[in-house]
Image (cartoon, rainbow, N blue to C red):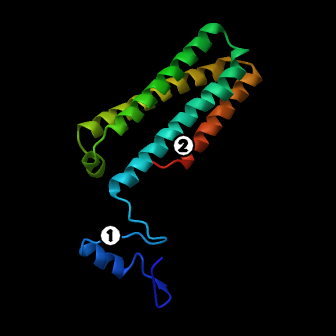
Amino acid sequence: MLVYKNKNICRGALLSFLTILGLTFSAGDCTPPKSQSEVKTKLIQQVTEGNRKCVTILRQKMLPKIKKNLNTETIKEIEKKINELDQAIEKLIAMTKDLTEEEIESGTGTGIAACIDQEKLIKEKGDELELIEVQILQTEPSKEVKDAISDAKKDIDDIINNSPKS
């Protein structure tokens, strides 16, 4: 840490002055400011990680509990929708890795447009899965199934509400 007259000047005028001169240095707690693309990339990673957590909740918490009480066709349909959602998320993750710094900073370009389309597809897949869950809740008398779906929905809502927005 750079200190002058008991004040941390690392991020202050001296750093700006040295930057203007084209000088760079590393001292103690002086971390360079993050670029817009680094910040946006981190945000994208946090959002996609939240999506992955939602799929994990569906697979590990909800599915095992409802398998005992629902017919095979319904379970297969749910598993298919979960897999489609997971594939869409993985595709988005791969697409975001191919974005250029210019696309990330500007928020425009073909890569960004493709990512936006993929996000829409993820939302559609999530909505399809939610529709199946609603139908099950309306027709399935089993408390265990209703509780499993409600618990998973609550956990997913917590993830969504606590994750950054892209």
Query: Which callout, 1 or 2, points to the residue nearer the camera?
Result: 1
Q: Identify the residue position indicated by label 2 in the image.
A: 160
Image coords of residue 35 (percent x, y): 34, 58
Q: Tell me the kind of residue under disc 2.
A: Ile
Q: Which residue is mark 1?
A: 24
Q: Residue at x 35, y 76 (%)?
A: 15
Query: Is 27 placed above or below 68 here?
Result: below
What's the residue at 38%, 51% (across, down)? 40
Lower position in the chain sequence, tag 1 or tag 2: 1
Residue 166 appears in view: no
Relative to 87, is 70 on the left or the right? right
Q: Nearer the viewer, residue 158 or 5?
A: 5
Which quarter of the picture shows residue 69?
A: top right
Total numbered labels placed on residues in the image: 2
**Badge 1 density bin: few <14, some 14–19, many ≥20, Cα 10 Å:** few
Q: Nearer the viewer, residue 163 or 133?
A: 163
Q: Could you say where residue 70 lies in the image, as x and y percent from the top left?
A: 68, 13
- Residue 6 makes an appearance in the image: yes
> Which residue sits at x=48%, y=71%?
28
Question: Could you tell me which secondary element the residue under label 2 belongs to?
Answer: helix
Could you tell me the amino acid type at mark 1?
Thr
Residue 110: image x %, image y %?
A: 23, 37
Q: Position of residue 30 (x, y in %)?
A: 44, 70
Q: Which residue lies at the image location 44% right of the left edge and 72% below the top edge?
A: 27
| Nearer to us in this view, 121 or 6 | 6
Secondary structure of the residue carrying numbered label 1: loop
